[in-house]
Amino acid sequence: MAPSSGPDGARRRILAVANQKGGVGKTTTTINLAAALAEQGRRVLIVDLDPQGNASTGLGIESARRARSSYDLLVGQEEAAGLVQATAQSNLGVIPATGDLASADVELVEDPARARRLQRSLRDPGLLEAWDYIVIDCPPSLNLLTVNAMAAADAVLVPLQCEFFAMEGLSQLLTTIREIRRGLNPGLAIEGVVLTMYDRRNNLSDLVARDVRANLGDVVYRTVIPRNVRLSEAPSYALPAIVYDSNSTGSLAYRALARELLERGARAAA
Ligand code: ADP
Ligand code: MG
């Protein structure tokens, strides 16, 4: 087993949840996949890398607890361990985001290694010892923030909304991943593609799901995340849906996704 392997033998421990489209379920997936992994006994750290801070809000991190944030991690190069805030789950932590993250690309323009700043911060043996998984919630763009996340990650997890233009933009995302592999992070894998907001009453959802599977094959998770109002309500209660309504169809789906991710990790390690 490689020294960097996690408890599941998984070599992919830092995950960037990315898709440059907004509203496809990145933040919902980050929160609930992380919460489901935490529920299954893993120690999980979420890094909120979206200046909108939706993951931080959804986890109940009020502004008083955002004085220190992922901005300090990226721009200040502060030690990650000192920036972690607690959540409702004891083994789920978060480094919250604030709006000042939006100007990071301008502030870092003079740093020739600006794309590697998060990589430097997260590839810290102490941090990797403390957490089994680090899940990075990316902004809806392929900007410097997302590039930093992909440079730091072992793998990219792509939420894809079951809608007509689902595949549109995906080739651009895949091109970016290839470019990152060529330079910043040769080992970057694609963890998987997860179909979100699936509506079984809508034929289009089914059509899109089949089309995506036909195009992308096994990289698409068997688990599909249904459209479920509990998933969209939970953030206003400052809780993951997994905690807010443990038996909702959305929670069950994210739990299944977590299991599938762990199985894939175990298989990859075998
Ligand atoms: P992104 O982070 O990609 O912008 P979000 O996770 O914030 O996307 O989701 C966009 C909106 O859709 C949010 O209001 C969220 O609550 C809602 N949403 C996400 N996934 C689902 C789902 N499976 N069912 C119902 N609503 C969802
Ligand atoms: Mg988001």
Image: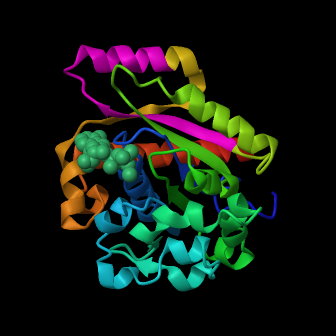
Image position, residue 111 (x, y; %): 73, 66
Residue interval drawn in magenta: 189-212
Whether residue 2 is visible to the viewer of this picture, yes or no, is: yes
Examine the structure image and report whether residue 199 is included in the region drawn in magenta.
yes
Relative to 121, is 196 on the left or the right? Answer: left
Relative to 87, is 177 on the left or the right? Answer: right
In this view, the residue in front, 163 or 129, is: 163
Relative to 154, is 38 on the left or the right? Answer: left
Establish if 188 lies above or below 235.
above
Whether residue 46 is visible to the viewer of this picture, yes or no, is: no
Q: Which residue is at 41% across, 25% downward? A: 166
Establish if 21 lies above or below 68.
above
Image position, residue 223 (x, y; %): 42, 34
Q: Which residue is at 30% across, 63% downward? A: 58
Image position, residue 137 (x, y; %): 47, 56
Picture quarter with the N terminus: bottom right
Q: Which residue is at 45% across, 70% downward? A: 100
Picture quarter with the C terminus: top right
Q: Which residue is at 41% across, 84% downward? A: 67
In this view, the residue in front, 152 or 50, is: 50
Quarter of the image where one finds residue 203? top left
Quarter of the image where one finds residue 198? top left
Relative to 118, is 71 on the left or the right? Answer: left
